[in-house]
């Protein structure tokens, strides 16, 4: 176990103020008289991680937060596509060896890629972690455009089409017996951004559940997973971000969650501007440009990994197509915000709306 002092994060007793999590009344906190704490740390998955939970004292909660941090840090290093780590073969290692040789990896990578493969099949390719060659081009142009807005450019379509020739998921060879992953195409690159954070969040939540730990809320860059309910016996209340960041109305809905996940995807998260046009980070595998069907989508289901993947999938689909897919899945609901701010929902979504909105 890592020394608690080596993990730098902030522990606060009381309420959490954040756009993604609704403020709650903490006066009544159950028969156990547990206190409500909030921990926050940066850098993992290049985002902000927040943990809200109830515990008997600060020491107990600090241990919970430390354990979650350590587990997420493991996944962060394994699923990283940008950085090398001593003694670790990660997604970057696999990419670096594309077309050269299989890479022996931790089972945690294989398990995640198997889920990604299932997501690829169930979404008809709308979630494809083998899209890295295309996404890296957009990433580079977006970074340059943010750093130097006056010189911002859109990637040439011929360059994107050439990269798209190297996104065939069938060329991701997973050998479970040998614990290896091999990219047959030397120009293929993996980018697991559509699933890795949610998948890691789900595994961290399951670790807490396996230990009998309840009354915890995890948010990893907006991938939110409730472990049980609040310590006062009520469901967790989650605000859904208004994609119109200029509006005085910061949220567009509030949900009650008990042991469920909420993941949103939107055009307001990561983007840059070229000639007055916003280009966000969610790229449609068919058009190779940012999808324009919606301002935002949100998915509610048990599994945070699937919520993450499905939010990307339905953002890249026309509403009717995405609705049909969601309605065909048990225990999954969704909300869509159209370009004109019209809101549409799946048939069972209303059951999760908070009565205290």
Image (cartoon, helix red, strand yellow):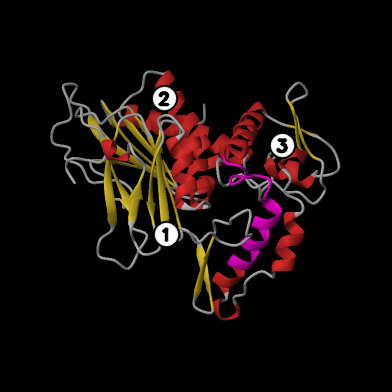
Q: Nearer the viewer, residue 356 or 54?
A: 356
Q: Read off the residue under disc 1.
A: 295
Give how far across and how far down residue 315 sits, in percent: 49, 52
**Magenta stretch?**
123-142
Q: Which mark is residue 89?
A: 3
Give how far across and how far down residue 50 sits, in percent: 38, 43
What is the distance, in whole Å, between disc 1 and disc 3 at their CAs? 37 Å
Residue 35's image quarter?
Answer: top left
Q: Nearer the viewer, residue 19 or 341?
A: 341
Query: Residue placed at 74% from the left, 38% from the top?
Result: 170
* 197 magenta-colored: no
Query: Residue placed at 61% from the left, 44% from the top?
Result: 192
Q: Which mark is residue 171?
A: none
Q: Read off the residue under disc 2.
A: 208
Up-down relation of residue 241 to residue 173 (above or below): below
Residue 56's image quarter?
Answer: top left
Give neighbour class at mark 2: few <14, some 14-19, many 20+ (Cα, 10 Å).
some
Q: Nearer the viewer, mark 1 or mark 3?
A: 1
Say whether disc 3 or disc 2 marks the residue closer to the N-terminus. 3
Label 1: element kind: loop
Q: Is mark 1 in CB contact (under 8 Å) with mark 3?
A: no
Say whether disc 2 or disc 1 marks the residue closer to the N-terminus. 2
Q: Nearer the viewer, residue 256 or 13?
A: 256
Q: Nearer the viewer, mark 2 or mark 1?
A: 1
Give the side of residue 308 with respect to residue 104, left or right: left
Say whether disc 1 or disc 3 marks the residue closer to the N-terminus. 3
What is the distance, in whole Å, between disc 3 and disc 2 at their CAs? 26 Å
């Amino acid at each position: 176990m890592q020394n608690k002092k080596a993990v730098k994060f902030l522990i606060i007793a009381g309420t959490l103020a954040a756009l993604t999590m609704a403020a709650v009344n903490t006066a009544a906190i159950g028969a156990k008289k547990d206190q409500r704490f909030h921990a926050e740390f940066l850098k993992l998955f290049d985002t902000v991680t927040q943990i809200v939970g109830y515990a008997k004292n600060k020491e107990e909660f600090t241990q919970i937060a430390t354990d979650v941090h350590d587990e997420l840090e493991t996944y962060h290093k394994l699923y990283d596509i940008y950085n090398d780590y001593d003694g670790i073969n990660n997604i970057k290692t696999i990419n670096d060896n594309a077309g050269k040789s299989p890479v022996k990896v931790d089972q945690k990578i294989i398990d995640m890629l198997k889920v990604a493969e299932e997501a690829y099949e169930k979404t008809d390719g709308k979630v494809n972690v083998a899209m890295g060659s295309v996404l890296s081009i957009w990433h580079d142009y977006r970074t340059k455009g943010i750093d130097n807005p006056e010189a911002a450019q859109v990637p040439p379509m011929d360059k994107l089409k050439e990269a798209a020739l190297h996104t065939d998921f069938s060329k991701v060879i997973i050998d479970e017996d040998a614990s290896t992953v091999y990219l047959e195409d030397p120009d293929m690159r993996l980018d697991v951004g559509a699933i890795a954070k949610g998948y890691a969040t789900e595994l961290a939540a399951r670790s807490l559940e396996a230990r009998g730990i309840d009354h915890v809320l995890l948010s990893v860059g907006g991938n939110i997973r409730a472990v049980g309910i609040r310590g006062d016996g009520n469901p967790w209340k989650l605000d859904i971000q208004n994609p119109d960041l200029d509006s005085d109305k910061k949220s567009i809905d509030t949900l009650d969650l008990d042991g469920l996940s909420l993941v949103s995807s939107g055009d307001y998260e990561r983007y840059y501007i070229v000639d007055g046009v916003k280009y966000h980070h969610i790229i449609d595998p068919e058009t190779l440009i940012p999808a324009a069907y919606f301002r935002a989508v949100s998915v509610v289901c048990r599994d945070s990994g699937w919520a993450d993947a499905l939010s990307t999938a339905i953002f890249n689909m026309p509403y009717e197509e995405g609705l049909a897919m969601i309605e065909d899945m048990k225990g999954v609901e969704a909300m869509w915000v159209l370009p004109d701010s019209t809101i549409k929902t799946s048939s069972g979504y209303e059951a999760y709306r908070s009565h205290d909105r």
